[in-house]
Image (cartoon, grey):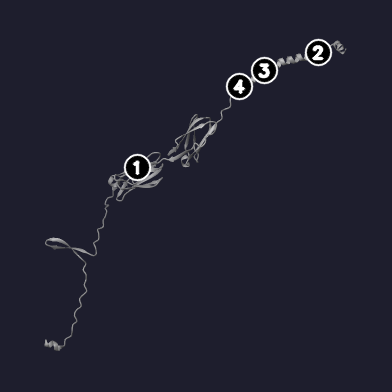
């Protein structure tokens, strides 16, 4: 009864028709928004695929050059997967940063020094590389020359001063040499009794190489002579020369021995009578 009356009302839709109308509206909206959602999802996927990947992680290579005297200021070169250079600190330590995975060679250099080992291989594989260490040894050099003529150079004393001190003696040919010297500035001075030298002193600066041909000229001093003292004669004997048989004969006289005088006999007094009787 009620249903009949509702159906008979003008301007009112039946209840089942009202539900059907809402469903059609929902389907219509779904049909409109579904393509938009699909397009939005596709654009998001495409956008994500076109994003650049983050840069790879990097690491470091480090070590120490000892002693510090040889490591300070040393140049350390990195080669291999990438190249770089750095300078060791005052304590001899060095570090390369921003190093990607790969195989590298580390090589130190410093004027006046050699290194053990000469270089090291460092393989970076997901972690830092440490303790790529080196040992520095100071290079040594020599200074040599000749003093001529050999008569003046033979036995001459040659003195080294400056960065280090030493003395040596020139050989019979006048040659001299100093070895085991570090880089630095030196002075070389020859000397020998009875001679002067030209030049009197020479400067020598060692810088990564030996110095040869540091020569001098020796000149004998004028009027110089070696005096020899005549041996003294013995006080216990004297030599004299006598002429005998037309020849000069040396006779050795022993020192005279003074004899004590003999006692004289006692004199007796005589009377005048004894004297007249005689």
Q: Secondary structure at mark 2?
A: helix
Q: Which structural element holds mark 4?
A: helix
Residue 195, placed above or below residue 102: below
Name the residue at 66% across, 19% down: 41
Location of mark 4 (residue): 49
Tag 1 secondary structure: strand
- Cα–Cα span, label 3 and label 1: 92 Å
Q: Is residue 259 above or below residue 108?
A: below
**Disc with the residue nearer the chain's start (1 vs 2):** 2
Distance from the alpha carbon under mark 3 to that under mark 4: 17 Å
Q: Which comes sooner in the sequence, label 1 or label 4?
A: 4
Horizontally, residue 246 falls left or right of residue 170, namely left
Percent across and percent down for residue 269 are 18, 85
Q: Is residue 260 left or right of residue 109?
A: left
> Mark number for residue 2?
none
Dot 3 or dot 1: first in sequence order is 3
Q: Which residue is mark 2?
A: 16
Quadrant of the rendering where the C terminus is positioned = bottom left
Contact between marks 3 and 1 (CB within 8 A): the answer is: no
The tag on residue 144 is: 1
């Amino acid at each position: 009864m009620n249903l009949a009356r509702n159906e008979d009302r003008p301007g009112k839709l039946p209840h089942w028709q009202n539900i059907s109308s809402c469903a059609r509206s929902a389907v219509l909206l779904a049909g409109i928004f579904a393509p938009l959602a699909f397009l939005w999802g596709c654009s998001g996927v495409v956008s994500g695929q076109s994003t650049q990947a983050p840069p790879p992680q990097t690491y470091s290579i480090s070590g120490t050059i000892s002693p510090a005297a040889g490591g300070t200021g040393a140049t350390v070169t990195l080669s291999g997967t990438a190249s770089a250079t750095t300078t060791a600190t005052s304590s001899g330590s060095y570090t390369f940063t921003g190093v990607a995975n790969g195989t590298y060679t580390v090589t130190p250099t410093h004027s006046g020094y050699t290194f053990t080992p000469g270089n090291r291989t460092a393989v970076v594989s997901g972690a830092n590389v440490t303790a790529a260490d080196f040992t520095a040894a100071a290079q040594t050099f020599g200074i040599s020359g000749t003093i001529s003529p050999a008569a003046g150079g033979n036995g001459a004393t040659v003195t080294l001063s400056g960065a280090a001190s030493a003395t040596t003696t020139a050989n019979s040919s006048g040659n001299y040499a100093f070895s085991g010297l570090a880089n630095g500035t030196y002075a070389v001075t020859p000397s020998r009794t009875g001679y002067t030298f030209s030049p009197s002193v020479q400067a020598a600066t060692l810088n990564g190489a030996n110095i040869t041909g540091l020569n001098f000229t020796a000149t004998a001093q004028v009027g110089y002579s070696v005096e020899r003292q005549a041996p003294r004669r013995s006080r216990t004997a004297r030599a004299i020369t006598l002429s005998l048989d037309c020849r000069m004969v040396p006779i050795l006289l022993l020192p005279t021995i003074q004899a004590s005088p003999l006692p004289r006999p006692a004199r007796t007094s005589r009377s005048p009578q004894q004297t007249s009787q005689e």
